[in-house]
Image: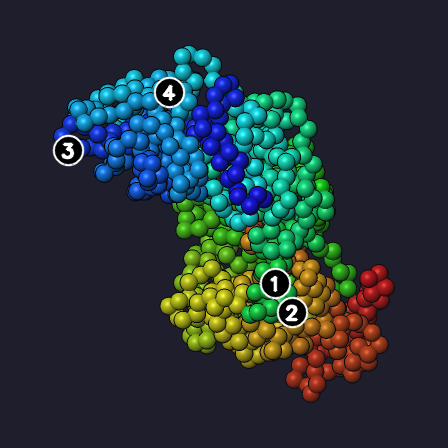
């Protein structure tokens, strides 16, 4: 970068002020257009008018007035300018006028037009020429305008430019015309020529400012608001309807400063082609913090087919937040393999978020709240880059990623996909640096759609948890839409229902906890009954039933939790229990949704399990009314509310809320807390084991993607007795990785997209992934997770014992006769043999 960022433009304007003529004469696009300084009697209405292209921002500009007397040759006053030139000509030009009381009229005198960077744009003299000795025009030989006013000039007259053109050099001065300050002169027209009907003079090869000088070393241009000449090669063209309405230029003439970019966006739809060398004149502007050139007064194509500069190799993570600024507007290439870490706005804005080293993880998934999580968030911020589609259209059709084929239900682009060698221009907009690709991005399906988590043949019972994203069924009779949440129409609900039903059907859990189902009771028209009816219709049999906790509604929220189960596999024991503020004031039930617990008897293993399904208060909710705001430690709003609820939940379960005597407890649901957050820590401190952490690991596990980062809000935690009996834990990644456009919604989609983005399958049935926990080994009487000789010994001890006898273990009474008999032994032995086979297989 030059020590004087505007030295090229200064040379250009100095040449104009010195009156260099001929075909190569430099242009002065902003200039003094009208002047009045003397008249008969007392001087009245002294004024100076400036003309220029539409959008020229004169804020920070000035008129410096000079006394040309041989004994003076210095400035005597400065008029500060303000305002933006608007179109008064219909051709993109206008004027602004400024009072100049005290404008001197003793020969000779002069006026210098100075821009916001203190560069002299024009130095004119009247009644003779001279060279000032101070101020911004020091050393410049002024150009006499050749006309003058006298003490006999009538009031209301002025000196004006006349002719046709687009720059000062196209016009000539004429004396004593009726003043027209604030309007285009009566004998003047802005027609884009250089006067006399001659074609405009090409600017190609004329002095131009280096792009690096325009970009500067900071986030914004040091030349903002000034008119600059730029000559460079078109590297990327995003002109045309719906695109970015412009193109990118880059200069091979790089300066020696790596902190300054050699690329620049030009806002113009005047046709150009990639490889054209163009000379443009326009105003430097920061548009949503992107440095660009707009309000062009001229664009000349100086040659075509020029080689493009080689892309600069860039890699993630960035060294610091400002590092990408040095490449703004330039061709760049990212040779490393990058991962799609978010696709939330793929169909809305054509955007994807990329990261290096795999997907980004939510800070509190892997780091403790506080400084560690804040540091992880800072690392995430440096390790991401948006990929855009070169368009400013919302909800584009088609959605061009992935290629070939565009986005569809059958041609998804999941988070976790990879791309290598992404190449394009680095731009900025809406608060983020973004790559506008100039080459096709070839995404590798590194995270293909998964099958259902494998069934562990050793396990007797499968328990799932699934947030079904506002499953609201209207009035239950086909109408009643829109409701408070969820589908807006019956058509949308049918699409939503089909996807949710398919996902649960394939998951095939024996017991499934639900979150975000409509809290509208347990009648046949209720949402949970509707869901079960859909499942049974698909199965062709009454496979599922739902738990009715014996109340009309659970809590006061629009959504609630629920439990469905397969009666052929399990049997509810006792009644469901509800945890709310009436049970424990720590559980604030107008924030958290009340929890439901139900004990089930697994018909295969003959073991009981109490399952508590939960949905704690969200991070984005407002808990300021109970003094529980976001403290900035990474846990979001309402963390105390969630933590208190978790503590209450653990204490409640410890006291057998279903009064069944079950020793095995499993907490499932959307706890709205990531793995390292306080609510999970509270449950672990109470003796619960985080099964996802234990089986999958916090570096690999996720059920939700938010703000470009993955983590799991959906949990399964087992108490001490249950933990050794857990055989398998898995997440089914059918939702979090999928573009949201593939869900049931029809808004913001074309007719073709309503059909093409949708399939009645499990994928993007919700925004959360379900999880599956497989527990209990049939024949495991000692609860250590296997069926072996130790269990055989225990069974022998149970033979002949009946209900009420000391040490009676109901788990050994497989036929529920009330006594342990040889018939029970034959059942136990079959389990023992089956486990031996399954254990070897696993």
Q: Which residue is mark 4?
A: 171
Does residue 820 appear left or right of residue 636 in this picture? right
Disc 3 element: loop
For the residues bearing labels 1 and 2, Cβ distance under 8 angstroms: no
Q: Earlier in the sequence, mark 1 or mark 2?
A: 1
Q: Which quadrant would the N terminus be assigned to in this image? A: top right
Q: Earlier in the sequence, mark 4 or mark 1?
A: 4
Q: How many numbered markers are drawn?
A: 4
| C-alpha separation, residue under disc 3 versus residue under disc 4 | 30 Å
- Neighbourhood count class around disc 1 (C-alpha, 10 Å): few under 14, some 14–19, many 20 upward: many
Colour scheme of the picture: rainbow
Residue 154: quadrant of the picture: top left
Can residue 717 be seen in the rendering of this structure? Answer: yes
User: Comparing marks 4 and 1, which lies closer to the viewer?
Assistant: 4
**Residue farthest to the front, as pictured:** 71
| C-alpha separation, residue under disc 2 versus residue under disc 3 | 92 Å
Q: Which residue is mark 3?
A: 42
For the residues bearing labels 4 and 2, Cβ distance under 8 angstroms: no
Where does the image place residue 803, in percent across and percent down from the top left? 67, 81
User: Comparing marks 2 and 3, which lies closer to the viewer?
Assistant: 3
Q: Which residue is mark 1?
A: 376
């Amino acid at each position: 970068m030059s020590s004087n960022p505007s030295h090229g433009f200064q040379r250009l304007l100095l040449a104009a002020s010195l009156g260099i003529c001929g075909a190569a004469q430099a242009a002065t696009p902003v200039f003094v257009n009208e002047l009045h300084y003397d008249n008969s009697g007392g001087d009245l209405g002294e004024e100076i008018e400036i003309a220029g292209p539409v959008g020229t921002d004169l804020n920070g500009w000035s008129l410096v007035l000079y006394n040309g007397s041989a004994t003076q040759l210095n400035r005597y006053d400065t008029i500060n300018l303000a305002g933006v030139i608007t179109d008064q000509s219909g051709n993109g030009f206008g004027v602004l006028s400024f009072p100049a009381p005290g404008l001197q009229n003793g020969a000779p005198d002069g006026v210098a037009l100075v821009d916001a960077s203190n560069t002299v744009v024009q130095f004119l003299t009247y009644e003779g020429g001279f060279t000032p000795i101070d101020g911004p025009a020091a050393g410049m030989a002024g150009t006499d305008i050749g006309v003058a006013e006298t003490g006999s000039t009538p009031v209301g007259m002025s000196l004006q430019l006349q002719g046709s053109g687009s720059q000062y050099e196209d016009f000539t001065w004429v004396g004593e015309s009726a003043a027209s300050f604030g309007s285009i002169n009566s004998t003047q027209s802005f027609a884009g020529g250089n006067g006399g009907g001659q074609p405009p003079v090409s600017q190609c090869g004329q002095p131009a400012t280096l792009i690096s000088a325009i970009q500067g070393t900071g986030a914004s241009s040091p030349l903002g608001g000034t008119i600059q000449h730029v000559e460079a090669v078109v590297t990327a063209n995003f002109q045309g309807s719906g695109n970015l309405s412009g193109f990118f230029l880059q200069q091979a003439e790089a300066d020696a400063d790596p902190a300054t970019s050699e690329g620049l966006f030009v806002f113009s739809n005047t046709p150009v082609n990639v490889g054209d060398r163009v000379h443009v004149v326009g105003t430097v502007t920061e548009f949503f913090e992107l440095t660009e050139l707009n309000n062009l007064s001229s664009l000349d194509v100086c040659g075509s087919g020029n080689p493009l500069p080689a892309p600069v190799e860039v890699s993630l993570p960035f060294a610091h937040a400002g590092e990408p600024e040095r490449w703004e507007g330039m061709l760049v290439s990212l040779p490393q393999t990058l991962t799609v870490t978010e696709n939330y706005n793929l169909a809305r804005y054509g955007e994807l978020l990329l990261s290096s080293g795999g997907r980004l993880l939510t800070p509190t998934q892997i780091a403790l709240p506080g400084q560690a999580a804040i540091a992880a968030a800072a690392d995430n911020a440096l390790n991401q880059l948006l990929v855009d589609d070169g368009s400013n259209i919302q909800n584009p059709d088609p959605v061009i990623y992935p290629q070939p084929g565009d986005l569809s239900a059958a041609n998804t682009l999941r988070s976790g996909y990879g791309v290598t060698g992404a190449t394009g221009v680095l731009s900025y907009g809406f608060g983020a640096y973004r790559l506008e690709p100039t080459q096709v991005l070839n995404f590798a399906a590194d995270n293909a759609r998964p099958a259902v988590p494998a069934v562990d043949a050793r396990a007797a019972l499968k328990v799932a948890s699934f947030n079904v994203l506002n499953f609201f069924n209207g009035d239950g009779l086909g109408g009643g839409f829109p409701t408070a949440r969820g589908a807006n129409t019956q058509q949308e609900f049918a699409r939503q229902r089909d996807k949710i039903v398919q996902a649960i059907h394939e998951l095939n859990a024996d017991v499934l906890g639900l979150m975000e189902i409509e809290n509208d009771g347990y009648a046949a028209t209720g949402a949970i009954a509707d869901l079960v009816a859909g499942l049974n219709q698909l199965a062709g049999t009454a496979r599922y039933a739902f738990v009715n906790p014996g109340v009309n509604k659970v809590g006061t929220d629009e959504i609630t939790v629920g439990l469905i189960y397969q009666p052929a596999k399990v049997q509810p024991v006792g009644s469901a229990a509800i945890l709310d503020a009436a049970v424990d004031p720590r559980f604030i039930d107008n924030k958290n949704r009340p929890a439901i617990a139900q004990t089930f008897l697994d018909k295969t293993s003959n073991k009981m399990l109490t399952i508590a399904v939960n949905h704690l208060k969200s991070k984005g909710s407002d808990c300021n009314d109970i003094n529980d705001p976001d403290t900035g430690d990474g846990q979001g709003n309402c963390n105390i509310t969630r933590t208190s609820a978790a503590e209450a939940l653990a204490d409640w379960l410890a006291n057998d809320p279903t009064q069944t005597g079950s020793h095995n407890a499993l907490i499932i649901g959307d706890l709205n807390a990531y793995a390292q957050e306080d609510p999970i820590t509270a449950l672990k401190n109470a003796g619960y084991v985080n099964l996802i952490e234990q089986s999958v690991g916090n570096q690999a596990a996720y059920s939700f993607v938010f703000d470009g980062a993955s983590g799991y809000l959906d949990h399964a935690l087992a108490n001490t007795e249950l933990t050794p009996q857990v055989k398998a834990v898995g997440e089914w990644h059918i939702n979090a990785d999928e573009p949201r456009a593939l869900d049931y919604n029809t808004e913001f989609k074309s007719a073709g997209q309503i059909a093409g983005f949708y399939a009645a399958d499990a994928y993007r049935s919700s925004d959360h992934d379900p999880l599956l926990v497989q527990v209990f080994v049939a024949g495991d009487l000692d609860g250590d997770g296997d069926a072996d000789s130790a269990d055989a010994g225990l069974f022998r001890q149970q033979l002949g014992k009946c209900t009420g006898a000391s040490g009676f273990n109901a788990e050994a009474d497989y036929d529920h006769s009330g006594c342990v008999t040889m018939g029970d032994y034959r059942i136990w032995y079959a389990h023992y043999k089956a486990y031996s086979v399954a254990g070897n297989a696993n």
